[in-house]
Amino acid sequence: MFNLDFKNYGHLEKKHKEWCVSHSALPTPNPHLGNEFIDWLYSIQDDIYTLKPRDMLEALSNLIRTIQEGNVLNPILFNALFESNFLFWELQKKQNVFCFVFSWPEGPGFQRIKSLLVKRASRRANSDLEDALRAEGLLDELTNVLSGTEGNSLFQKAKKYLQHDGNIKIPVESVLGNNNFYDFVQFCSNHFNYKKFSSQREGWGPYPLIDELRNTVCPYCNRSYTHSVFEDDIFGGRPELDHFLSKSFFPFFALSVYNLIPVCHSCNHAKLDKHVVKIADGQAEYTHLHPNVAEDNVLNTRMFETEQEGDLLTFLMQNDFSLRGKIRITGNCKARTKVKNSLELYKLAFNGVDERLIGYYTDHYKDIERTLNLVKQYPQSAIESIADLVKEDSKTLQRVFVENLVSESPWEEPLGKLKSDLLESIVSSLDFEAEES
Ligand SMILES: [Zn+2]
């Protein structure tokens, strides 16, 4: 959510690449020449450890093109699904099957199929599903894809992969005509050895990397400190390194330096193997804020404001200020969808039932209140005497007190962004009133 600001890290790239090339290099020449996916990997091998986040997207788009141009067994089905958002692939642990993942297409035909799958398996449900698939021209293709799976009826088989409460997951082996993709994933898992890097205690490794990044608070949640305790040969502790593009889906980016984000345990755990990238119009794009993408830096955009209307300062001075349920995300926030997705992913703030905001941020209201209540430590009579002394009106003075609480470097303080946004929204509501009067 908050940018790591990598701009002067040329030397970091150099050190990191040196380590990767000497500790985890790909064998040369390519021992699997002719496997289109491994050939793709070798075509980017010189840059893979230092690819910028945008170039990673470009590489992924190329990889997807390789799939599309290859031997696709069920092109009609694949393309019908691909037209909506392709969310790459994942291992379905229960079935131990690698699947291509798609979000549900928007069209009415697919929405009907989705609603049918909510039902229980029955003869009636099965024939309804068949009708709906036939209407989309996909009955034969889907039957074909699911033929090897368990279950008696098409309905039972389809329920496993067309999840009405999740995504559509089609086994890779039903889409691709050979084992090249499996061999590729296996090859990558063997040759991008993140475990070796993360346990490194001499020379370059996670400690010096985190040290050089110098970020103090988790860039995903802005709640917890992410310091490391590291000096000479003391490896006292460090934040976790999240793979922004999950290493279980994208093992070839497991050592890529811009993909390693120092984060708190809570965020790392919340994110796990969630999809944060999709294909839209043939191009890969991030669906969540990336700490190493400049346009995703929302630090200078006010994201939160209070719902209290009217003279907030007076309200603040005279009432017990309670924020519970009163934090809202501003309507004009840039990258709004990404912000929303990220706040939800890290469980920070999202809509619960009846649009009530829930999440860690709403539970942090006590911290925010404590800051805001600092203003109240100046009694009204004291403010009036000081105002008299410096020949200012007491309102201006109160405003100065609030302004002083706005942090100059909110990204370095837990909840800094939330606090400074709320305080700034109070100050700007004063500006608005001043203009009106
Ligand atoms: Zn965090």
Image: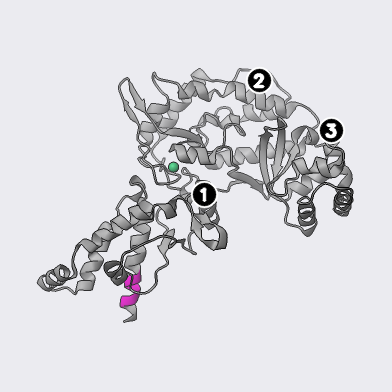
Please give the label number shown on residue 148.
3
Foreground: disc 3 or disc 2: 3
Outermost residue on the bottom side: it is 437
The first of marks 1 and 3 along the sequence is 3
Q: Earlier in the sequence, mark 3 or mark 2?
A: 2
- Residue 420's place in the image compared with 215, above or below, is below
The residue at the point 37 percent across, 60 percent down is: 422
- Determine if residue 47 is in view: no
Residues drawn in magenta = 429-434
Instruction: Tell me: residue 204, above or below residue 135.
Output: above
Q: Which residue is mark 2?
A: 30
* Mark toward the start of the polypeptide (1 vs 2): 2
Q: Secondary structure at mark 1?
A: helix
Q: CA distance from mark 1 to mark 2?
A: 39 Å
Residue 329, image x, y percentages = 47, 60
Q: Residues within 10 Å of mark 3 (few under 14, many from 20)?
A: few
Q: Quadrant of the C terminus?
A: bottom left
